[in-house]
Image (cartoon, rainbow, N blue to C red):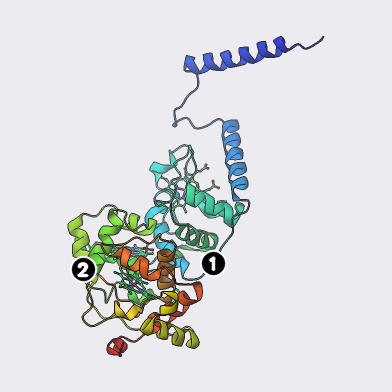
């Protein structure tokens, strides 16, 4: 028999009409309670795997550092464990009824490459409850999460709790909030390679402006967005007051020659390249309270914030443009030198001539 075009078109039209009728009849269930047929489940996961695999091609994987882990682990506890469970807590029953249910990630992570995990964490998975990263315009936070996920399958409950910094908190009210913040910000857990800032030593004005900036998204961080999402403005102010003030010790010095270079730049700037003297604004005895103190901050945190300023992604409080301009001409080696200098700078240097 010769197949003619009108037969092909006829069959196609019949298929489309058939599909339309089945859909219209209401026979296809969208009830989540009955689950997917096995075949639907296989097809959907095949689509997900293929889509993620193709999108991951060409994605450049950055170097993972130890400093990424505490921040990502703390965020996992605050923003992922509610659905996926953790080594310290089984998946809640309520989410097991989601369709598809969020899987226990222990066995899943090994089946994805770093680039694929990044895409899932940054963009989420459509048609499932898997959300995208809370802020879209920076990638470093999702990469830190990938670094943590790589470690995740080996962690037992105690190792997980140690890394996340979360302990069972018996207190209530403000004390409870402070304990949650300290899960990440506790000064004794911070190292030069940490991406988490030290709050002690800042003015309450700066801390309050930073928290308000996170709340109204003029400073964008998925980690901080989740950490403060349920808090009122009054609570943010109280927290800023609590964390301000205390002194901050310098961090151990990472590399000596970088310190010297950073010190020269911080004191004098480099007028030939349009780099201002950082110490003309920062860490002065009579500094503007909206200008943060840099001395004693983890070097990795300082470097990451400077990179964000250079890329015009940092945002901040009412004076953020001042700093965006100050950072505009910084190059990668300036950033590592300045970060090393300020991290190890003793606050006793505060009154050094400048
Ligand atoms: C609201 C619930 C929810 C939250 C919160 C959530 N997820 Fe998911 N996640 C899901 C669901 C649902 C899937 C899809 C499961 C599937 O494909 O069958 C998923 C899938 C994943 C996968 C792919 C697993 C696989 O192989 O199927 C990874 C990895 C993942 N999530 C990591 C995370 C991380 C990291 C976070 C926190 C930043 C997070 N998820 C937050 C619900 C959630
Ligand atoms: C899961 C870890 C985590 C938790 C919990 C957390 N933070 Fe943060 N915090 C961070 C990270 C990471 C940053 C840097 C984010 C960025 O790149 O802007 C940050 C930044 C900040 C800043 C800006 C500091 C500066 O020098 O600019 C303030 C203020 C702050 N956090 C306060 C709090 C308070 C108050 C709480 C408790 C309600 C809290 N944080 C809970 C990880 C955390
Ligand atoms: C003209 C004043 C000025 C100069 C000069 C200046 N800064 Fe800043 N800097 C600011 C202000 C204001 C902010 C606060 C921005 C905000 O609202 O978050 C800031 C923020 C920062 C932060 C973020 C700190 C944190 O806790 O998140 C870093 C890091 C920083 N500056 C480093 C430098 C370095 C390094 C230099 C020298 C190259 C420099 N600054 C020069 C005004 C200045």
Where is residue 219, by image quadrant?
A: bottom left
Report if the beta carbon of the residue with label 2 is closer than 8 angstroms to ligand 3. no
Report if the beta carbon of the residue with label 1 is closer than 8 angstroms to ligand 1. no
Which disc is residue 205 wearing? 2
For label 1, the residue is 64
- Give percent across and percent down for residue 201: 27, 77
Front label number (1 vs 2)? 2
Q: Quadrant of the N terminus?
A: top right
Viewer-side residue, 333 vs 79 = 333
- Give percent across and percent down for residue 85: 44, 52
- Which residue appears farthest toward the right when viewing the image? 1
Where is residue 185, by image quadrant?
A: bottom left
Q: What element carries label 2?
A: helix
Q: Which of marks 1 and 2 is nearer the N terminus?
A: 1
Task: Evaluate whether residue 301 shows in this view.
Answer: yes
Task: Evaluate whether residue 163 shows in this view.
Answer: no
Q: How many labels does the image show?
A: 2
Crowd rating for badge 2 (residues with CA inside 10 Å; few <14, some 14–19, many 20+): some
- Give percent across and percent down for residue 212: 25, 58
């Amino acid at each position: 028999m010769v197949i003619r075009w009108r037969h092909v078109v006829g069959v196609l039209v019949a298929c489309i009409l058939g599909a339309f009728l089945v859909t219209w009849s209401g026979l296809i269930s969208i009830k989540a309670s009955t689950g997917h047929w096995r075949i639907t489940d296989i097809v959907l996961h095949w689509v997900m795997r293929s889509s993620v695999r193709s999108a991951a091609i060409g994605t450049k994987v950055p170097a993972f550092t130890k400093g990424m882990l505490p921040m990502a682990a703390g965020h996992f506890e605050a923003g992922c464990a509610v659905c996926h469970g953790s080594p310290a807590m089984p998946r809640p029953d309520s989410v097991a009824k989601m369709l598809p249910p969020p899987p226990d990630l222990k066995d899943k992570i090994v089946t994805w490459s770093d680039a694929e995990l990044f895409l899932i964490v940054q963009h989420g998975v459509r048609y499932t409850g898997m959300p995208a990263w809370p802020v879209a315009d920076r990638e470093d936070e999702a990469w830190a999460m990938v670094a943590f996920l790589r470690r995740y399958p080996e962690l037992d409950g105690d190792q997980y709790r140690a890394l996340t910094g979360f302990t069972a908190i018996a207190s209530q009210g403000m004390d409870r909030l402070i304990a949650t913040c300290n899960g990440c910000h506790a000064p004794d857990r911070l190292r030069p390679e940490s991406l988490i800032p030290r709050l002690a030593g800042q003015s309450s004005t700066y801390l309050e402006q930073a928290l308000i900036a996170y709340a109204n998204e003029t400073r964008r961080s998925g980690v901080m967005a989740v950490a403060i999402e349920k808090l009122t403005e009054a609570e943010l102010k109280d927290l800023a007051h609590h964390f301000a003030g205390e002194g901050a010790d310098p961090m151990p010095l990472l590399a000596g020659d970088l310190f010297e270079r950073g010190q020269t730049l911080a004191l004098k700037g480099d007028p030939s390249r349009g780099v201002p003297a950082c110490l003309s604004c920062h860490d002065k005895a009579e500094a503007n309270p909206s200008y943060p103190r840099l001395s004693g901050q983890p070097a990795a945190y300082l470097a990451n914030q400077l990179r964000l300023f250079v890329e015009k992604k940092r945002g901040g409080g009412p004076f953020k443009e001042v700093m965006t301009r100050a950072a505009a001409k910084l190059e990668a080696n300036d950033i590592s030198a300045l970060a090393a200098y300020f991290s190890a700078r003793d606050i006793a240097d505060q009154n050094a001539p400048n």
